[in-house]
């Protein structure tokens, strides 16, 4: 792999002849096309690929959140890569039929040292709503009254996530999550966290269970 600042045509993306151009960590990168392999993948390699696919399938709809709030960069690993590694290692589990699925209580949408939601509860309400409540724990640790709530509802049946980031503060102690009408009757895996007002620090998220929209 090679990096370059200025070429004949500047940076490029995609395949040109026998090289591929892309952007990696803010740099223009060129690498050669991988040589085709006739080797049959081992059982461990197949399993790792399936685990990776299951992790990425879940993470893609919430990438905008985990890419910002799942800890911080570590050497050559991006925040999103750290999240992917965690999911492959801790969250993806065998589904009993040769494939892999998600262990929803182990899912994290953020990781950090900020105080998370205290005694949270999620209650479905008519009109595809979920009422989310928590206690105001401002002043504990690094928690501030103006920390901002982020909540995510993941619908497995559609592989779709609804992200709520509406500026609701920690000291509000409640928020009404309005889901689209077409999700009525569907089960939602619900997660929530807090980030600081400047969105530079986050809490480790909490799982609020599976809630059926009514």
Image (cartoon, helix red, strand yellow):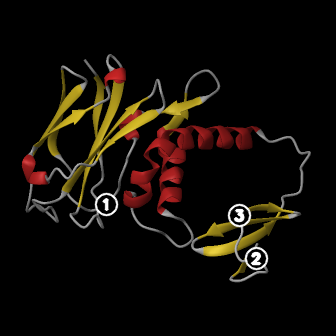
Residue occupying the point 31% across, 60% down: 112
Mark 3–mark 2 distance (CA, rounded to whole Å): 11 Å
Figure quadrant of the C terminus: top left
Residue 24, percent from left and from top? 62, 69
Note whether 169 is above or below 2 in the view shown: above
Q: Earlier in the sequence, mark 1 or mark 2?
A: 2
The correct choice, above or below, for 190 with respect to 73 in the image is above
Looking at the image, is mark 1 or mark 3 earlier in the sequence?
A: 3
View extreme (bottom): residue: 6
Q: Position of residue 85 (x, y in %)?
A: 53, 52
The residue lying furthest to the right in this view is: 38
SS label for mark 2: loop
Location of the N terminus by quadrant is: bottom right
Packing grade of label 3 (10 A; few <14, some 14-19, many >=20) is few
The answer to whether 198 is drawn above or below residue 119 in the figure is below
Residue position marked by numbered label 2 in the rendering: 9
Disc 1 target residue: 112
Asked if disc 1 and disc 2 are in contact, CB closer than 8 Å, the reply is no
Instruction: Give me the residue at 8% from left, 62% from top.
Output: 139
Say whether residue 136 is visible.
no
- Badge 3 element: loop
* Residue at the (15%, 64%) spot, across then down: 141
Which one is nearer the viewer's eye here, 168 or 76?
Answer: 168
Q: Disc 3 or disc 2, which is closer to the eye?
A: 2
Disc 3 designates what residue? 13
How far across and how far down the image is residue 189, in percent?
A: 35, 31
């Amino acid at each position: 792999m090679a990096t370059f600042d200025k070429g004949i045509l500047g940076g490029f993306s995609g395949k040109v002849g026998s090289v591929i151009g892309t952007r990696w960590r803010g740099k223009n990168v060129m690498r050669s096309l991988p040589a085709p392999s006739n080797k049959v993948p081992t059982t461990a390699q197949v399993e790792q690929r399936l685990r990776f696919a299951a992790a990425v399938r879940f993470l893609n709809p919430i990438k905008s959140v985990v890419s910002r709030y799942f800890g911080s960069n570590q050497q050559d690993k991006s925040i999103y890569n750290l999240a992917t590694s965690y999911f492959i290692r801790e969250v993806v589990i065998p589904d009993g039929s040769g494939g892999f699925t998600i262990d929803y209580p182990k899912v994290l949408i953020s990781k950090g040292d900020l105080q998370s939601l205290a005694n949270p509860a999620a209650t479905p309400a008519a009109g595809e709503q979920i009422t989310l409540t928590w206690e105001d724990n401002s002043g504990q640790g690094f928690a501030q009254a103006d920390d901002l709530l982020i909540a995510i509802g993941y619908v497995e049946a559609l592989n779709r996530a609804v992200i709520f980031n509406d500026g609701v503060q920690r000291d509000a102690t409640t928020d009404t999550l309005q889901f689209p009408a077409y999700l009525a009757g569907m089960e939602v895996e619900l997660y929530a966290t807090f980030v600081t007002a400047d969105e530079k620090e986050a809490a480790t998220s909490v799982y609020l269970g599976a809630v059926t929209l009514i």
